[in-house]
């Protein structure tokens, strides 16, 4: 039996490449959502060479699921754009394959989008991260959106929601950003056009920090 019945009102878009067994943590968390409206999960596979696609498809009996191929262009922005293009609802909720949504995440994001165009939630770093990784990276704010370069707030791509119409009007994420900050660019462009952005404190994402200095800096 799928998690929710009826036409979906929101689409959870997950870019992934070689998610492996860690991907099950995120998919299990989506299966365990509470008080969520009907939602679909759009998995955008960006060229996996492991069993990621098979793992994803094994959840088709528990989630309203689409698995799409975004392998023609490498990169998380392209993968998110392809997934969002094929989403069938008015609300786009973005998360990553190696993290874990909190139990009320879908509901919190959908509720927040009722009064905003873009929404971001807090990142919780301890549950999934190796202890040494916590020494390499500062703690993000848990009571407000981060602000980039002392200019404007943004929602991190690993915990973001946006109205589908707004995403389309902005042309999605700019794929020229290859090493991050695509979500900053997206949020700034939105605000420059008069779109609203807000913080959703209950939309907690358990975020997985990489286990080495090099991997953390790359992340």
Image (cartoon, rainbow, N blue to C red):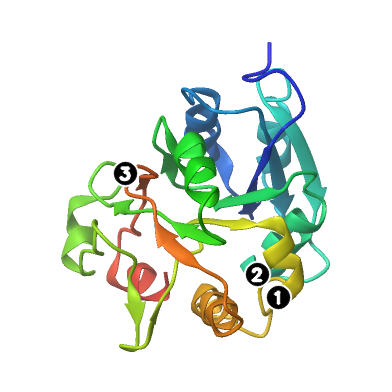
SS of the residue at dot 2?
helix
Q: Earlier in the sequence, mark 2 or mark 1?
A: 2
Residue located at (71% from left, 75% from top): 170
Write down the residue under mark 3: 128
Q: Nearer the viewer, residue 69 or 120?
A: 120
Examine the rendered structure and indicate whether residue 56 appears above or below residue 34: below
Count of marks placed on residues: 3
Q: Nearer the viewer, residue 110 or 156?
A: 110
Nearer to us: label 2 or label 3 = 2
Q: Is residue 97 visible?
A: yes
Q: Position of residue 144 (x, y in %)?
A: 28, 62
Q: Position of residue 80 (x, y in %)?
A: 68, 61
Toward which corner of the image does residue 67 lie, by quadrant? Answer: top right
Write down the residue under mark 2: 77
Q: Nearer the viewer, residue 54 or 12?
A: 12
Q: Earlier in the sequence, mark 2 or mark 3?
A: 2
Q: Earlier in the sequence, mark 3 or mark 1?
A: 3
Dots 2, 3 in contact, CB < 8 A: no
Nearer to us: label 3 or label 1 = 1
């Amino acid at each position: 039996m799928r998690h929710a019945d009826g036409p979906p009102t929101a689409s959870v878009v997950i870019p992934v490449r070689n998610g492996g067994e860690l991907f099950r943590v995120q998919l299990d968390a989506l299966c365990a959502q509470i008080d969520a409206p009907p939602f679909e999960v759009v998995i955008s596979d960006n060229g996996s060479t492991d069993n990621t696609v098979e793992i994803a498809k094994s959840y088709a009996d528990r989630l309203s699921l689409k698995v799409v191929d975004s392998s023609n262009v490498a990169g998380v922005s392209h993968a998110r754009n392809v997934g969002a293009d094929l989403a069938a609802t008015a609300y786009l909720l973005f998360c990553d394959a190696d993290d874990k949504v909190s139990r009320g995440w879908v509901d919190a994001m959908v509720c927040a989008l009722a009064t905003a165009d873009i929404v971001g939630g807090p990142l919780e770093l301890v549950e999934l991260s190796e202890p040494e990784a916590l020494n390499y990276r500062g703690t993000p704010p848990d009571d407000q959106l981060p602000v980039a370069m002392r200019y404007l707030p943004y929602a991190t791509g690993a915990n973001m929601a946006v109205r589908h119409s707004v995403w389309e009007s902005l042309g999605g994420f700019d794929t020229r950003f290859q090493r991050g900050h695509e979500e900053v660019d997206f949020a700034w462009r939105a605000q420059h056009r008069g779109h609203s952005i807000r913080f959703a404190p209950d939309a907690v994402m358990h975020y997985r920090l990489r286990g080495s200095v090099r991997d953390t800096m790359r992340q």
